[in-house]
Image (cartoon, coloured by chain):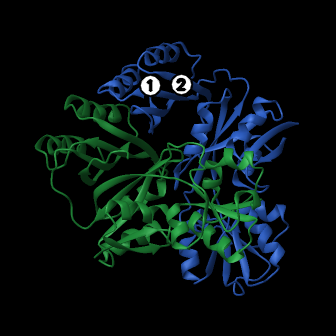
Chain colours: A green, B blue
Amino acid sequence: MSKVSFQGESGAYSESASKIFFQDKITTIPCSTFKQVLDNTEKEISDFSILPVENSIEGNVGESYDALFSSNLYAIGEIYHKIEHCLIGNGKLDDVNTVYSHPQALGQCRNFLQNGSYKTVPTYDTAGSVKIVKDMNDKNVACIASKNAATIYSMPIIKENIENDSNNYTRFLILSKSGTDLTNNDKTSIIFSIKHEPGTLYEIIRIFYENKINLTKIESRPKIGKTWEYNFYVDFIGHQLNEDITKVLSEIKKCTSFLRVIGSYPIATLS
Amino acid sequence: MSKVSFQGESGAYSESASKIFFQDKITTIPCSTFKQVLDNTEKEISDFSILPVENSIEGNVGESYDALFSSNLYAIGEIYHKIEHCLIGNGKLDDVNTVYSHPQALGQCRNFLQNGSYKTVPTYDTAGSVKIVKDMNDKNVACIASKNAATIYSMPIIKENIENDSNNYTRFLILSKSGTDLTNNDKTSIIFSIKHEPGTLYEIIRIFYENKINLTKIESRPKIGKTWEYNFYVDFIGHQLNEDITKVLSEIKKCTSFLRVIGSYPIATLS
């Protein structure tokens, strides 16, 4: 059975996403940092790594991109995982007056929490708050986490789907030591650096446009140092083994001071 | 004296940045959410709001951009604030075996922590960890936070500048109810939405390029809904009151389904 490294405690959303991607045919390894998640697969402690790269509410996960920048792993898949928050605890809904969770989860359930005038207590992570509430064994105290976290810690779910916005998705990349073949429904992720000279970004966008390649993501991040240099994170439709894409990548390489293809992988749909 | 709303506890990096920007001639109002930070100035409870928009290590602060999307405030300034982490506690360096802080700060001081083989305890925020360590009054326990947070809680600094990367900057925007005049050294921040049709982004980049306008930032964020629509966050050199920029903005408006100028403001330098 394949092993997948993820960041967080058992019951984290990253772990759930990996189980859905691999249809439960895996064992998972919790890690404390994104770097350890990647190192484990590079050192063959795990077969795959999973990293969150963007969230529909919070935006890009910069730390993941930085970890990918210096990694040698290839992206072999993506998954959009719906974040569905549950109120979890031993009491009934009327008993609860205090709610523990990660600040992001508390924010994403703000309407529910304000309507019920609950006291909130910020914690380090969602799955960890289930453990805290279980240990407290106080019917007035509940927490916000995933259904999976409730199952892992054998804790009752008081209410499901308490998030403000039901369109709360996190996109994850799955990485391994070897790349994938073409499926004709692929996406490619690249990282590149350019000097901040007028026209360089335009030139790169023009190459994509003239070759009819559809971008699905673009992000610039300044590299602060002696000179202003930018890293760009770009996703586009197509596989790097496709001849047209290979040609485009070699044209773009000429405009950059650094180019790394993170990988090409089948396009995921929003479920 | 002007009032500035910021997100976090007293001693937060946002508060320090606002004090530097206004040369200490302000009082500050701590807020629990980014939305409250903006609401306070919209309702004239404060004169200004300060929001973190990007960090050189962590990337963009998606939540800030979402708060700005639906705000009516104008950006009137930016500041790059260097994040310098201190080890704070009542003991000497040799006494310390446990370090409390926010996970991001712990990560940014990873080398220091690994060299000393410290036990780490994640907390909700950096300034809050100073309060915890003060209350514990245990010389074996320290925390990581700003020099300002140490001062506020009257706690000794054991060691300064313990971060891995000394190029750790957060960029903040300062917002108010009215805009600024031209200084001839200005930057403009805009948010726009486009339908995901081939060529739209290219067309916008082409308009900037052909009008010799230099982009300093670009980020796409998918709006997940019935159709794929994208929000873009773009910064460029120039002031919206400049005639050329006004013309460019009206050309770009035609390519978008939504365009909001967050504001034009003097360009900050990295100090």
Q: Position of residue B73 (x, y in %)?
A: 68, 28
The label on residue A209 is none
Q: Position of residue B132 (x, y in %)?
A: 78, 71
Question: Where B84 falls versus A135 (above or below)?
Answer: above
Which of the chains bears the disc numbered 1?
B
Q: Where is residue B13 in the image (x, y as percent from the top left)?
A: 70, 54
What residue is disc 1 on?
B213
Q: Nearer the viewer, residue B204 or A188?
A: A188
Quadrant of the image occupied by residue B136: bottom right
Q: Which residue lies furthest to the bottom in this view?
A: B94
Quadrant of the image occupied by residue A156: bottom right
What residue is disc 2 on?
B238
Q: Where is residue A206 in the image (x, y as percent from the top left)?
A: 27, 30
Quadrant containing the N terminus of chain A in the rendered view: bottom left
Q: Determine whether the residue tagged by mark 1 lies in a helix, strand or loop.
A: loop
Disc 2 residue type (three-letter): Gly
For label 2, count other residues whose C-alpha is less than 10 Å away and answer few (under 14), some (14-19) or many (20+). many
Determine whether label 2 and label 1 are within 8 Å by CB. Answer: yes
The disc, 2 or 1, on the residue closer to the chain's N-terminal end is 1
Disc 1 residue type (three-letter): Ile
Query: Could one spot residue B146 in this view of the protein?
Result: no
Which of the chains bears the disc numbered 2?
B
**For this view, does B168 lie left or right of residue A46?**
right
For label 1, count other residues whose C-alpha is less than 10 Å away and answer few (under 14), some (14-19) or many (20+). some
Question: Where A210 falls versus A48 (above or below)?
Answer: above
**For this view, does B178 lie left or right of residue A176?**
right
Query: Could one spot residue A248 in this view of the protein?
Result: yes
